[in-house]
Image (cartoon, rainbow, N blue to C red):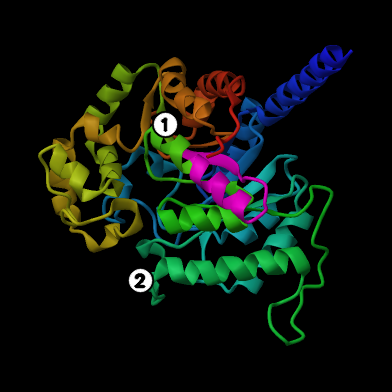
Protein backbone atom coordinates (compact mmCIF):
# COMPACT_ATOMS: atom_id res chain seq x y z
CA UNK A 1 0.00 0.00 0.00
CA UNK A 2 2.77 2.42 0.86
CA UNK A 3 4.52 1.70 -2.44
CA UNK A 4 1.28 2.13 -4.37
CA UNK A 5 0.58 5.44 -2.62
CA UNK A 6 4.16 6.52 -3.31
CA UNK A 7 3.90 5.54 -6.99
CA UNK A 8 0.57 7.34 -7.25
CA UNK A 9 2.07 10.49 -5.77
CA UNK A 10 4.91 10.29 -8.25
CA UNK A 11 2.42 9.96 -11.10
CA UNK A 12 0.45 12.95 -9.83
CA UNK A 13 3.66 14.98 -9.50
CA UNK A 14 4.71 13.96 -13.00
CA UNK A 15 1.35 14.99 -14.41
CA UNK A 16 1.62 18.35 -12.66
CA UNK A 17 5.11 18.89 -14.07
CA UNK A 18 3.99 17.97 -17.58
CA UNK A 19 0.98 20.28 -17.31
CA UNK A 20 3.25 23.09 -16.13
CA UNK A 21 5.57 22.51 -19.07
CA UNK A 22 2.67 22.47 -21.52
CA UNK A 23 1.24 25.66 -20.02
CA UNK A 24 4.67 27.27 -20.26
CA UNK A 25 4.90 26.64 -24.01
CA UNK A 26 3.46 29.46 -26.06
CA UNK A 27 2.87 29.66 -29.78
CA UNK A 28 4.68 32.57 -31.37
CA UNK A 29 2.52 35.39 -32.67
CA UNK A 30 3.56 38.13 -35.04
CA UNK A 31 3.13 41.83 -35.57
CA UNK A 32 4.19 44.22 -38.30
CA UNK A 33 5.59 47.74 -38.18
CA UNK A 34 3.73 50.41 -40.13
CA UNK A 35 5.83 53.33 -41.41
CA UNK A 36 4.02 55.96 -39.34
CA UNK A 37 4.65 58.69 -41.92
CA UNK A 38 2.54 60.98 -44.09
CA UNK A 39 0.26 60.28 -45.92
CA UNK A 40 -2.04 58.39 -43.57
CA UNK A 41 -3.15 56.13 -46.43
CA UNK A 42 0.22 54.36 -46.31
CA UNK A 43 -0.38 53.59 -42.62
CA UNK A 44 -3.92 52.37 -43.32
CA UNK A 45 -2.44 50.08 -45.96
CA UNK A 46 -0.36 48.40 -43.27
CA UNK A 47 -3.47 47.87 -41.13
CA UNK A 48 -5.04 46.01 -44.04
CA UNK A 49 -1.81 44.10 -44.58
CA UNK A 50 -1.75 42.98 -40.94
CA UNK A 51 -5.33 41.74 -41.21
CA UNK A 52 -4.64 39.95 -44.49
CA UNK A 53 -1.61 38.02 -43.30
CA UNK A 54 -2.99 37.18 -39.84
CA UNK A 55 -0.82 39.18 -37.45
CA UNK A 56 -2.00 40.02 -33.94
CA UNK A 57 -0.54 43.53 -33.73
CA UNK A 58 0.39 46.52 -35.86
CA UNK A 59 3.12 48.72 -34.40
CA UNK A 60 4.15 52.29 -35.19
CA UNK A 61 7.51 53.98 -34.47
CA UNK A 62 7.96 57.20 -32.50
CA UNK A 63 10.63 58.94 -34.54
CA UNK A 64 11.27 62.61 -35.22
CA UNK A 65 13.71 62.16 -38.13
CA UNK A 66 13.80 59.44 -40.75
CA UNK A 67 16.43 56.85 -41.58
CA UNK A 68 17.44 58.54 -44.86
CA UNK A 69 19.13 61.86 -45.51
CA UNK A 70 16.50 64.21 -46.98
CA UNK A 71 18.78 64.96 -49.96
CA UNK A 72 18.92 61.24 -50.80
CA UNK A 73 15.34 60.17 -50.10
CA UNK A 74 13.86 61.47 -53.41
CA UNK A 75 15.96 58.88 -55.26
CA UNK A 76 14.54 55.99 -53.22
CA UNK A 77 11.73 54.01 -54.95
CA UNK A 78 9.38 54.35 -51.96
CA UNK A 79 9.56 58.15 -52.20
CA UNK A 80 6.73 57.84 -54.73
CA UNK A 81 4.49 56.85 -51.81
CA UNK A 82 6.07 58.86 -48.98
CA UNK A 83 7.27 62.27 -50.20
CA UNK A 84 9.28 63.16 -47.06
CA UNK A 85 11.06 60.50 -45.00
CA UNK A 86 10.94 62.84 -41.97
CA UNK A 87 7.15 63.18 -42.10
CA UNK A 88 6.36 61.17 -38.97
CA UNK A 89 2.97 61.45 -37.32
CA UNK A 90 2.74 61.63 -33.54
CA UNK A 91 2.20 57.93 -32.78
CA UNK A 92 -0.47 58.37 -30.10
CA UNK A 93 -2.51 60.69 -32.33
CA UNK A 94 -2.11 58.37 -35.31
CA UNK A 95 -3.22 55.28 -33.39
CA UNK A 96 -6.18 57.13 -31.89
CA UNK A 97 -7.25 57.97 -35.45
CA UNK A 98 -6.77 54.40 -36.69
CA UNK A 99 -7.96 52.50 -33.63
CA UNK A 100 -11.57 52.06 -34.75
CA UNK A 101 -10.54 50.76 -38.17
CA UNK A 102 -9.17 47.40 -37.05
CA UNK A 103 -9.69 44.71 -34.40
CA UNK A 104 -5.92 44.20 -34.19
CA UNK A 105 -3.96 45.41 -31.19
CA UNK A 106 -1.93 48.55 -31.86
CA UNK A 107 1.52 49.21 -30.47
CA UNK A 108 4.13 51.96 -30.17
CA UNK A 109 7.63 50.72 -30.91
CA UNK A 110 8.92 52.63 -29.03
CA UNK A 111 8.60 56.01 -27.32
CA UNK A 112 11.33 57.29 -25.01
CA UNK A 113 11.67 58.59 -21.47
CA UNK A 114 12.86 62.09 -22.42
CA UNK A 115 10.28 63.85 -24.60
CA UNK A 116 7.28 63.18 -22.35
CA UNK A 117 6.82 62.76 -18.61
CA UNK A 118 5.50 59.41 -17.42
CA UNK A 119 2.09 60.81 -16.51
CA UNK A 120 1.69 62.28 -20.02
CA UNK A 121 2.57 58.93 -21.57
CA UNK A 122 0.08 57.14 -19.31
CA UNK A 123 -2.76 59.49 -20.22
CA UNK A 124 -2.02 59.19 -23.94
CA UNK A 125 -1.66 55.41 -23.69
CA UNK A 126 -4.94 54.96 -21.81
CA UNK A 127 -6.69 57.25 -24.28
CA UNK A 128 -5.59 55.14 -27.24
CA UNK A 129 -6.26 51.93 -25.29
CA UNK A 130 -9.90 52.89 -24.75
CA UNK A 131 -10.44 54.36 -28.22
CA UNK A 132 -9.00 51.36 -30.07
CA UNK A 133 -10.94 48.18 -30.76
CA UNK A 134 -7.88 46.03 -30.08
CA UNK A 135 -6.21 47.96 -27.26
CA UNK A 136 -2.66 49.31 -27.00
CA UNK A 137 0.82 47.89 -26.42
CA UNK A 138 3.10 50.60 -25.03
CA UNK A 139 6.73 50.23 -26.07
CA UNK A 140 9.27 52.34 -24.16
CA UNK A 141 13.02 52.78 -24.27
CA UNK A 142 15.85 55.09 -23.24
CA UNK A 143 15.89 56.97 -26.55
CA UNK A 144 18.04 57.49 -29.63
CA UNK A 145 20.07 60.52 -30.58
CA UNK A 146 18.20 61.27 -33.83
CA UNK A 147 14.92 61.98 -32.03
CA UNK A 148 16.49 63.98 -29.20
CA UNK A 149 19.64 65.99 -29.87
CA UNK A 150 18.51 67.88 -33.02
CA UNK A 151 15.45 69.08 -31.10
CA UNK A 152 17.18 70.26 -27.94
CA UNK A 153 16.40 67.25 -25.73
CA UNK A 154 19.13 65.86 -23.46
CA UNK A 155 20.74 62.51 -24.19
CA UNK A 156 23.06 62.19 -21.22
CA UNK A 157 22.60 59.36 -18.69
CA UNK A 158 19.79 57.78 -20.76
CA UNK A 159 19.42 54.62 -18.65
CA UNK A 160 19.32 56.54 -15.36
CA UNK A 161 16.60 58.79 -16.75
CA UNK A 162 14.76 55.78 -18.08
CA UNK A 163 14.79 53.94 -14.75
CA UNK A 164 13.12 56.87 -12.97
CA UNK A 165 10.61 57.22 -15.81
CA UNK A 166 9.77 53.51 -15.95
CA UNK A 167 9.32 53.21 -12.20
CA UNK A 168 6.86 56.11 -12.26
CA UNK A 169 5.12 54.81 -15.40
CA UNK A 170 4.56 51.41 -13.79
CA UNK A 171 3.24 52.99 -10.59
CA UNK A 172 0.73 55.24 -12.38
CA UNK A 173 -0.53 52.47 -14.67
CA UNK A 174 -0.99 50.18 -11.67
CA UNK A 175 -2.57 52.66 -9.25
CA UNK A 176 -3.74 55.70 -11.21
CA UNK A 177 -1.87 57.88 -8.71
CA UNK A 178 1.17 60.06 -9.34
CA UNK A 179 3.92 59.11 -6.84
CA UNK A 180 4.42 61.50 -3.93
CA UNK A 181 2.18 63.35 -1.51
CA UNK A 182 0.30 65.44 -4.06
CA UNK A 183 -3.18 65.04 -5.50
CA UNK A 184 -2.08 64.14 -9.04
CA UNK A 185 -4.03 61.21 -10.46
CA UNK A 186 -5.39 59.74 -13.68
CA UNK A 187 -9.18 59.46 -13.72
CA UNK A 188 -9.44 57.32 -16.85
CA UNK A 189 -10.19 53.64 -16.19
CA UNK A 190 -6.90 51.77 -15.92
CA UNK A 191 -8.30 48.75 -17.76
CA UNK A 192 -10.48 48.04 -20.77
CA UNK A 193 -11.87 44.74 -22.02
CA UNK A 194 -8.27 44.03 -23.08
CA UNK A 195 -6.90 44.60 -19.59
CA UNK A 196 -4.23 47.21 -18.94
CA UNK A 197 -1.91 48.56 -21.64
CA UNK A 198 1.13 46.29 -21.61
CA UNK A 199 4.53 47.93 -21.15
CA UNK A 200 7.12 46.58 -23.61
CA UNK A 201 10.72 47.55 -22.83
CA UNK A 202 13.37 47.90 -25.54
CA UNK A 203 16.20 46.59 -23.38
CA UNK A 204 19.64 45.35 -24.45
CA UNK A 205 22.33 46.03 -21.84
CA UNK A 206 22.47 44.58 -18.30
CA UNK A 207 20.69 47.49 -16.57
CA UNK A 208 17.94 47.64 -19.17
CA UNK A 209 17.42 43.88 -18.92
CA UNK A 210 17.04 44.24 -15.15
CA UNK A 211 14.46 47.00 -15.61
CA UNK A 212 12.60 44.88 -18.15
CA UNK A 213 12.24 42.09 -15.62
CA UNK A 214 11.33 44.40 -12.73
CA UNK A 215 8.73 46.54 -14.49
CA UNK A 216 7.96 45.29 -18.00
CA UNK A 217 5.14 43.17 -19.38
CA UNK A 218 7.09 42.52 -22.56
CA UNK A 219 10.64 42.66 -23.90
CA UNK A 220 11.17 44.18 -27.35
CA UNK A 221 14.85 44.34 -28.36
CA UNK A 222 15.78 45.84 -31.72
CA UNK A 223 19.54 45.31 -31.93
CA UNK A 224 20.80 42.28 -33.84
CA UNK A 225 21.97 39.39 -31.68
CA UNK A 226 22.44 35.65 -32.12
CA UNK A 227 19.68 33.24 -31.01
CA UNK A 228 21.98 31.99 -28.25
CA UNK A 229 22.52 35.53 -26.95
CA UNK A 230 18.77 36.14 -27.18
CA UNK A 231 18.05 33.06 -25.05
CA UNK A 232 20.66 34.08 -22.47
CA UNK A 233 19.19 37.59 -22.15
CA UNK A 234 15.67 36.21 -21.96
CA UNK A 235 16.66 33.95 -19.08
CA UNK A 236 18.35 36.88 -17.32
CA UNK A 237 15.17 38.98 -17.64
CA UNK A 238 13.08 36.12 -16.27
CA UNK A 239 15.40 35.84 -13.27
CA UNK A 240 15.06 39.56 -12.55
CA UNK A 241 11.28 39.19 -12.79
CA UNK A 242 11.25 36.30 -10.33
CA UNK A 243 13.41 38.28 -7.90
CA UNK A 244 10.81 41.08 -8.12
CA UNK A 245 8.02 38.53 -7.55
CA UNK A 246 6.63 39.11 -11.04
CA UNK A 247 5.77 36.88 -13.98
CA UNK A 248 8.48 36.90 -16.68
CA UNK A 249 7.65 39.38 -19.45
CA UNK A 250 6.57 38.25 -22.89
CA UNK A 251 9.68 37.87 -25.06
CA UNK A 252 9.55 39.79 -28.34
CA UNK A 253 11.91 40.78 -31.11
CA UNK A 254 11.89 43.55 -33.70
CA UNK A 255 13.15 41.86 -36.86
CA UNK A 256 13.81 44.10 -39.88
CA UNK A 257 13.16 42.02 -42.99
CA UNK A 258 13.57 42.30 -46.75
CA UNK A 259 11.34 39.69 -48.35
CA UNK A 260 11.37 38.65 -52.00
CA UNK A 261 11.63 35.68 -54.31
CA UNK A 262 15.03 34.67 -52.94
CA UNK A 263 18.16 35.97 -51.28
CA UNK A 264 19.79 36.07 -54.72
CA UNK A 265 16.97 38.21 -56.16
CA UNK A 266 17.33 40.65 -53.26
CA UNK A 267 21.09 40.71 -53.74
CA UNK A 268 20.41 41.91 -57.29
CA UNK A 269 17.96 44.51 -55.98
CA UNK A 270 20.51 46.00 -53.59
CA UNK A 271 23.13 45.93 -56.33
CA UNK A 272 20.81 47.85 -58.67
CA UNK A 273 19.60 50.21 -55.90
CA UNK A 274 22.76 50.87 -53.84
CA UNK A 275 21.21 53.73 -51.86
CA UNK A 276 19.08 51.11 -50.10
CA UNK A 277 22.31 49.74 -48.65
CA UNK A 278 22.61 52.84 -46.48
CA UNK A 279 20.53 51.12 -43.81
CA UNK A 280 23.91 49.70 -42.82
CA UNK A 281 24.60 53.07 -41.17
CA UNK A 282 22.62 51.72 -38.21
CA UNK A 283 25.14 48.92 -37.67
CA UNK A 284 27.94 49.70 -35.17
CA UNK A 285 31.25 50.99 -36.52
CA UNK A 286 33.22 47.98 -35.32
CA UNK A 287 31.20 45.75 -37.66
CA UNK A 288 31.99 48.04 -40.58
CA UNK A 289 35.67 47.69 -39.74
CA UNK A 290 35.26 43.91 -39.81
CA UNK A 291 34.18 44.26 -43.46
CA UNK A 292 37.08 46.57 -44.32
CA UNK A 293 35.15 49.86 -44.26
CA UNK A 294 35.01 52.87 -41.97
CA UNK A 295 31.59 53.84 -40.65
CA UNK A 296 30.67 57.34 -41.93
CA UNK A 297 30.17 58.43 -38.30
CA UNK A 298 33.46 56.83 -37.20
CA UNK A 299 34.58 53.54 -35.70
CA UNK A 300 33.17 54.44 -32.28
CA UNK A 301 29.64 54.83 -33.64
CA UNK A 302 27.17 52.55 -31.88
CA UNK A 303 24.93 52.59 -34.92
CA UNK A 304 21.22 52.84 -34.28
CA UNK A 305 21.52 54.49 -30.87
CA UNK A 306 23.65 57.50 -31.81
CA UNK A 307 23.67 57.99 -35.60
CA UNK A 308 22.01 61.16 -36.88
CA UNK A 309 21.86 60.64 -40.64
CA UNK A 310 21.10 64.30 -41.31
CA UNK A 311 24.49 65.30 -39.87
CA UNK A 312 26.32 63.20 -42.48
CA UNK A 313 27.40 64.47 -45.90
CA UNK A 314 24.85 63.25 -48.48
CA UNK A 315 27.33 63.18 -51.35
CA UNK A 316 29.76 61.10 -49.31
CA UNK A 317 26.89 58.72 -48.53
CA UNK A 318 26.06 58.44 -52.25
CA UNK A 319 29.67 57.59 -53.02
CA UNK A 320 29.85 55.10 -50.16
CA UNK A 321 26.63 53.20 -50.88
CA UNK A 322 27.85 51.05 -53.82
CA UNK A 323 30.87 49.92 -51.77
CA UNK A 324 28.77 48.52 -48.90
CA UNK A 325 28.91 44.71 -49.13
CA UNK A 326 25.73 42.67 -49.14
CA UNK A 327 27.04 40.74 -46.13
CA UNK A 328 27.07 43.93 -44.05
CA UNK A 329 23.46 44.64 -45.02
CA UNK A 330 22.60 41.16 -43.73
CA UNK A 331 23.75 42.25 -40.28
CA UNK A 332 20.79 44.65 -40.25
CA UNK A 333 18.07 43.03 -42.37
CA UNK A 334 17.00 39.42 -42.39
CA UNK A 335 16.92 38.83 -46.15
CA UNK A 336 15.35 36.19 -48.38
CA UNK A 337 12.30 34.27 -49.50
CA UNK A 338 9.68 33.19 -46.94
CA UNK A 339 11.50 29.88 -46.53
CA UNK A 340 14.91 31.52 -46.17
CA UNK A 341 13.56 34.05 -43.68
CA UNK A 342 11.82 31.33 -41.70
CA UNK A 343 15.09 29.42 -41.36
CA UNK A 344 16.68 32.52 -39.78
CA UNK A 345 13.78 33.66 -37.62
CA UNK A 346 12.68 30.24 -36.36
CA UNK A 347 15.92 30.00 -34.39
CA UNK A 348 14.75 32.93 -32.26
CA UNK A 349 11.42 31.21 -31.67
CA UNK A 350 13.24 28.13 -30.44
CA UNK A 351 15.32 30.45 -28.24
CA UNK A 352 12.15 31.74 -26.58
CA UNK A 353 10.76 34.53 -28.76
CA UNK A 354 6.97 34.72 -28.34
CA UNK A 355 6.19 37.81 -30.43
CA UNK A 356 8.02 38.59 -33.67
CA UNK A 357 7.56 42.17 -34.86
CA UNK A 358 8.35 42.21 -38.57
CA UNK A 359 9.81 45.55 -39.57
CA UNK A 360 9.26 45.69 -43.33
CA UNK A 361 11.63 48.62 -43.45
CA UNK A 362 12.23 48.64 -47.17
CA UNK A 363 10.28 47.41 -50.16
CA UNK A 364 12.18 46.03 -53.15
CA UNK A 365 9.05 46.38 -55.29
CA UNK A 366 8.76 50.07 -56.05
CA UNK A 367 5.56 52.07 -55.89
CA UNK A 368 2.17 51.63 -54.27
CA UNK A 369 1.69 48.06 -55.53
CA UNK A 370 4.77 46.79 -53.69
CA UNK A 371 3.01 45.77 -50.48
CA UNK A 372 0.20 44.02 -52.34
CA UNK A 373 2.73 41.95 -54.26
CA UNK A 374 4.31 40.87 -50.98
CA UNK A 375 1.07 39.80 -49.25
CA UNK A 376 1.30 36.15 -50.28
CA UNK A 377 4.94 35.86 -49.23
CA UNK A 378 4.33 37.58 -45.90
CA UNK A 379 1.30 35.42 -45.18
CA UNK A 380 3.36 32.29 -45.80
CA UNK A 381 6.09 33.52 -43.45
CA UNK A 382 3.61 34.53 -40.75
CA UNK A 383 1.76 31.21 -40.84
CA UNK A 384 4.99 29.25 -40.49
CA UNK A 385 6.23 31.39 -37.61
CA UNK A 386 2.89 30.94 -35.83
CA UNK A 387 3.53 27.19 -35.63
CA UNK A 388 6.64 27.63 -33.47
CA UNK A 389 6.30 26.81 -29.77
CA UNK A 390 8.46 29.00 -27.56
CA UNK A 391 10.00 27.24 -24.53
CA UNK A 392 9.67 28.58 -21.00
CA UNK A 393 12.62 30.56 -19.59
CA UNK A 394 15.19 28.44 -17.81
CA UNK A 395 15.55 28.70 -14.06
CA UNK A 396 19.06 29.16 -12.64
**Residue 394 on the magenta segment:** no
Question: Does the magenta segment cover residue 235?
Answer: yes
What range is drawn magenta here? 234-255
Relative side of 366 to 163, left or right: left
Say left or right for 348 vs 59. Answer: left
The disc, 1 or 2, on the residue closer to the chain's N-terminal end is 2
Q: Residue at x 77, y 68 (%)?
A: 175
Toward which corner of the image does residue 274 lie, by quadrant?
top left
| Residue 366 visible, this orientation | no
Q: Look at mark 2 in the image and give the residue it sits on.
A: 149
Residue 42 at x, y percent in the picture:
54, 43
- Residue 367's place in the image compared with 389, above or below, is below
Q: Nearer the viewer, residue 93 or 304?
A: 304
- Secondary structure at badge 1 equals helix
Res 227 label: 1
Residue 231: % across, % down: 47, 35
Query: Residue at horizontal 74%, vertical 55%?
Result: 129
Q: Position of residue 253 (x, y in %)?
A: 50, 39
The image quarter containing residue 21 is top right
Query: Which residue is pictured at 69% across the width and 55% down the height?
Result: 97
- Nearest the viewer among 247 and 156 is 247
Amino acid sequence: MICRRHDGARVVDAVRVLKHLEDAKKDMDTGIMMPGVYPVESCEQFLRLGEQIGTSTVWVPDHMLGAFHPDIWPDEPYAEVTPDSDGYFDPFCLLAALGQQTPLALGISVTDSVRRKAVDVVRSALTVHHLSRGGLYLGVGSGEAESLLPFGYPFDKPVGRFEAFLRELRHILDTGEVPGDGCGRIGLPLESEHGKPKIWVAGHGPRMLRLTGQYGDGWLPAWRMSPAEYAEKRDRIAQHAREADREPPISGLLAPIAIGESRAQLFDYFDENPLSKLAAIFIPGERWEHHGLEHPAGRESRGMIDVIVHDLDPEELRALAPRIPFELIEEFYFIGSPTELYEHLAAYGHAGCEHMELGIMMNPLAGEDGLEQNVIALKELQSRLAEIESPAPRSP
